Each structure stands twice: as structure tokens, then as C-alpha cells.
């Protein structure tokens, strides 16, 4: 069985070597979909009975590890020295420095890597993170996981 929870956040980025508008500082309303797979919990009387995982728990983990960290932050590539230096001059600016260029593909992969250990076999039901889908716009997204 698979379940999916969707969360949204806003963040800025730039693709420094892009040959079009994306090389400029800009932002997106990202949507993050977390798909989990596992067996339905069949323990009578358990809070999670009939579920793969409680959707509120799926949300809490994703918010703690990704959404609250990336929301209203500038996602900057460590190799983009000009932007990193500039952001460092802004007092109390929320900046997340990444080892990869912050494309939808790289962000989806990074989110998967961060979230995978957090969604372990929580209820003894073979729970695992199956996929992260990151929408950069309503029409553009990247999938990463056990596809």
C-alpha cells in the first residue's frame, strides 16, 4: 500500500550557470509530496489501525526535516560564491547552503536523502520512503526514490 502527503513552502534560489532567466535570484511556491509504502497496520486498538502511517505523523516529520528548514529560505549552491558572500552580508537571513545546484532534481534527491532515515519501519509494517516529488511550479516537478 502507498500513501502520499503534500506540503508546500516558499523558497528562493538561482541556477548560476543557466542560459536563461533562472540564473537570476528568484523564488518559487514549492510543493513537496512524500510517498510512503508499507503494510496497513492491523493491530486492533492501535491509534494507527487501518493506516500505513498517520498522515499527521507524515506531516510532522516532513515539516521538521525539510519544510521548516527550507521555507522562506534562500537555497544556495556552495559553489555560487558571489551569492553566498552576498547572503552572508544580510543579518539574520535564512540561507540553506547546499553542495549541489538547487534544481528541482537535486532538491528532490536531497529531500529524499534527508527524509529516508526519518520514515523507518515505525509501526513494524515495513514502512519505507518510496518517493519524493518536488514541484517547482504547478507544471514542473522532479521525482526521486524507488521508482
Image (cartoon, rainbow, N blue to C red):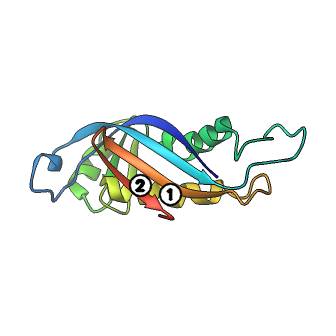
Residue at numbered disc 2? 108
Q: Residue at x 60, y 52 (%)?
A: 36
CB atoms of marks 1 and 2 within 8 Å = yes
Is the residue 104 above or below the residue 6 in the image? below
User: Tag on residue 103?
Assistant: none
Q: How many marks?
A: 2
Could you say where residue 20 lies in the image, as x and y percent from the top left?
A: 9, 51
Q: Measuring 31% from the left and 44% from the top, which residue is drawn there? A: 136
How far apart are the two marked residues, 1 and 2, measured between alpha carbons?
6 Å
- In the picture, measured across the screen, residue 52 lies left or right of residue 98, that is right
On the question of residue 15 being in view, the answer is yes
Crowd tier of the residue under label 1, counting other residues whose Cα lies within 10 Å: few below 14, some 14–19, many 20 or above = many
26 vs 30, left or right, is left
Across and down, in percent, residue 53 comes to: 70, 45
Residue 92 showing in the rendered view: no
Residue under label 1: 112
Assign a secondary structure to mark 2: helix
**Image quarter for residue 54?**
top right
Q: Residue at x 27, y 38 (%)?
A: 27
Circle 2: is it few (<14), some (14-19), or many (20+) Cα within 10 Å? many
Q: Position of residue 124 (x, y in %)?
A: 80, 57
Q: Residue 87 sits in which quadrant?
A: top left
- Name which quarter of the figure residue 37 lies in: bottom right
Going by the image, does 26 lie left or right of 21?
right
Determine whether the residue tagged by mark 1 lies in a helix, strand or loop.
Answer: helix
Relative to the observer, which residue lies in front, 31 or 72?
A: 31
Amino acid at each position: 500500500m502507498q500513501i502520499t502527503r503534500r506540503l508546500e513552502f516558499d523558497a528562493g534560489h538561482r541556477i548560476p550557470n543557466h542560459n536563461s532567466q533562472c540564473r537570476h535570484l528568484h523564488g518559487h511556491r514549492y510543493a513537496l509530496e512524500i510517498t510512503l509504502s508499507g503494510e496497513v497496520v492491523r493491530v486492533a486498538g492501535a491509534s494507527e489501525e487501518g493506516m500505513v502511517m498517520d498522515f499527521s505523523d507524515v506531516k510532522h516529520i516532513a515539516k521538521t526535516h525539510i519544510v521548516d528548514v527550507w521555507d522562506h529560505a534562500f537555497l544556495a549552491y556552495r559553489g555560487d560564491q558571489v551569492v553566498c558572500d552576498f547572503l552572508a552580508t544580510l543579518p539574520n537571513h535564512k540561507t540553506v547552503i547546499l553542495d549541489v545546484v538547487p534544481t528541482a532534481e537535486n532538491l528532490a534527491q536531497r529531500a529524499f536523502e534527508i527524509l529516508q532515515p526519518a520514515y523507518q519501519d515505525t509501526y513494524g509494517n515495513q514502512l519505507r520512503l518510496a518517493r519524493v516529488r518536488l514541484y517547482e511550479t504547478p507544471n514542473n516537478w522532479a521525482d526521486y526514490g524507488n521508482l
